Image (tube, rainbow, N blue to C red):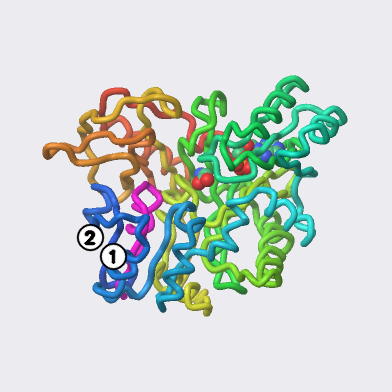
């Protein structure tokens, strides 16, 4: 089959890598893609905001399956439009995407369907006084979340009443535009975080290897939140007991509930979990693959990934397309530009060994070609991934390769995967 991937980051490179080696895949296209993706797929420059042009492209290239990477396209209703034009799409409808695009929707949904999550209250612009009054009666720390998509900048964990009240005021005053017109105030959960991806066909699902992301910029999980500085899979924190509970108490009721709401979920349901004493609660839903978890999770996937996503997209999940999800282990270390997640330089030349070998794959995130050189073009530049029979070997493979790649301002965390249970 011919497959079109939408997106341009490390996650999309990992999707292309796994789809391209699938037996049932003939050709992969990616809009717009990146220099890494262009080595395994045909990258096409179409304005992704012009959905009509994407649909024309699907017709021209006889696309059998469209896989949507980033959430913004789902929020914009791209999957609905493609489906209405008759294409099989892996990615939920705009309405089902509310599980990610509105934290208030997600929290109300979890409450209605009794899915374990932190205690919460929701306030809008007109309820500033009520929000402040509510805060005065809560324990610290307390978590404040903007309702809408905020590019990873919408969550504050406040450690004092003053900070909590200030953030509440700023948010409701529109600090994040329409994203913070409504806020969720949430109990702080103790524990360790992990994520599980479920491939869903609207009713049935299969989970991939559990993963752990490292969201903070600094070692030992310190400093600013980022899009993710590295990930490994499988994450043993999600042991078989925890995984069974995640399936029966979180994923199953989520799929049942969202179907009952007449928004059946087709795509990757990402459940972000907080785990303590083998009990998991939902921190957040995402409605797409995570970045950089996907680089680790798909590096160890064995089977026909194209067949799996296509079967989900047409509402008939083929679990036999999966041979194994965690026969091996993978560790993805992000090479970032110094200064990220704040200001950073772009356009620095990347040199060294970026070639695939038996135990390493280098995924491109923020790279581009400039005058025949590969240069940095984003905060997160490369996802250097080690793949081996166990996690310690995979970590060693990743870091060995990290030392073989250079660019001005190269920054990475040295502890990816190292504190796992
Ligand atoms: P979110 O965008 O909802 O995933 O929040 C971003 C990050 O904030 C999460 O990955 C957690 O590290 C942290 N976080 C969010 N909600 C909570 C909570 N209720 N308790 C503790 N940490 C949280
Ligand atoms: N790695 C976190 C995310 O993709 O949202």
Badge 2: how crowded within 10 Å, few (<14), some, or many (20+)?
some
Q: Is mark 2 within 8 Å of ligand 2?
A: no
Q: Quadrant of the N terminus?
A: bottom left
Disc 1 on helix, strand or loop? strand
Which residue is label 1 attached to? 28
Q: Give whichever of discs 1 and 2 has the lower sequence position.
A: 1
Work out whether residue 358 or residue 307 is closer to the camera in this orientation and state it: 307
**Percent position of residue 188, x then y:** 74, 35
Residue 17 within the segment the image draws in magenta:
yes
Question: Residue 42: which disc?
Answer: 2
Please state if 419 lies on the left or on the right of 79 as rendered: right
Quadrant where the image shows the C terminus:
top right
User: Residue lying furthest left in this view?
Assistant: 372
Return the residue nearer the eye: 11 or 167.
167
Is residue 321 a member of the stretch shown in magenta? no
Is 206 or 169 nearer to us in this picture? Answer: 169
Vertical arrangement, residue 168 with respect to residue 16, above or below: above
Q: SS for tag 2? A: strand
Residue 37 appearing in the image: yes
* Residue 33 horizontal side relative to residue 173, left or right: left
Which x, y percent locates residue 321?
A: 45, 73
Instruction: Write down the region rendered in magenta.
Output: 1-20
Q: Residue at x 50, y 77 (%)?
A: 318
Q: Is residue 273 above or below residue 91?
A: above
> Which numbered circle lies on residue 260?
none
Query: Most extreme residue toward the front, as rendered?
Result: 126
Q: Quadrant of residue 192?
A: top right
Marks 1 and 2, how far apart at CA: 6 Å
The answer to the question of whether label 1 and label 2 lie on touching residues, with beta carbons closer than 8 A, is yes
Q: Position of residue 147 (x, y in %)?
A: 64, 44
């Amino acid at each position: 089959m011919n497959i079109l991937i939408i997106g341009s980051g490390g996650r999309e490179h990992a999707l292309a890598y796994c789809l391209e080696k699938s037996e049932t895949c003939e050709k992969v296209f990616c809009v717009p893609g990146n220099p890494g993706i262009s080595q395994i797929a045909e990258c096409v420059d179409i304005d992704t905001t012009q959905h009509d042009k994407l649909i024309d492209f699907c017709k021209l290239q006889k696309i059998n399956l469209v896989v949507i990477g980033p959430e913004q396209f789902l929020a914009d209703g791209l999957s609905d439009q493609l489906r209405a034009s008759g294409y099989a799409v892996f990615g939920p409808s705009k309405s089902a995407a509310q599980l990610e695009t509105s934290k208030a929707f997600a929290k109300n949904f979890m409450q209605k369907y009794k899915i374990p999550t932190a205690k919460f209250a929701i306030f809008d612009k007109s309820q500033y006084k009520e929000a402040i009054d509510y805060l005065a009666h809560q324990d610290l720390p307390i978590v404040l979340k903007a309702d809408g998509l905020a590019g990873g900048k919408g969550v504050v964990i406040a450690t004092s009443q003053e900070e909590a009240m200030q953030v509440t005021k700023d948010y409701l005053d529109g600090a994040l535009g329409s994203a913070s017109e409504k806020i969720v105030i949430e109990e702080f959960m103790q524990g360790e975080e992990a994520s599980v991806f479920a491939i869903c066909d609207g009713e049935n699902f299969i989970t991939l290897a559990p993963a752990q992301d490292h969201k903070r910029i600094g070692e030992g999980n310190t400093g600013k939140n980022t899009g993710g500085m590295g990930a490994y899979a499988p994450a043993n924190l999600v042991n078989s007991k925890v995984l069974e509970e995640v399936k029966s108490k979180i994923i199953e009721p989520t799929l049942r509930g969202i179907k009952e709401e007449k928004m059946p979920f087709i795509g990757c349901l990402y459940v972000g979990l907080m785990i303590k004493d083998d009990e998991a609660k939902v921190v957040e839903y995402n409605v797409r693959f995570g970045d950089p978890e996907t680089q680790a999770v798909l590096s160890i996937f064995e089977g026909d990934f194209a067949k799996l996503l296509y079967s989900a997209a047409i509402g008939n999940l083929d679990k036999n397309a999966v041979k194994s999800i965690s026969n091996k282990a993978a560790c993805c270390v992000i090479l970032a530009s110094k200064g990220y997640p704040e200001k950073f330089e772009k356009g620095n030349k990347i040199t060294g060994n970026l070639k695939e070998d038996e135990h390493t794959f280098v995924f491109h995130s923020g790279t581009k070609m400039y005058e025949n050189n590969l240069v940095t073009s984003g905060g997160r530049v490369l996802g250097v991934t080690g793949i081996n029979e166990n996690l310690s070997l995979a970590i060693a493979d990743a870091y060995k390769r990290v030392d073989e790649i250079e660019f001005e301002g190269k920054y990475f965390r040295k502890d990816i995967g190292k504190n796992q249970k």
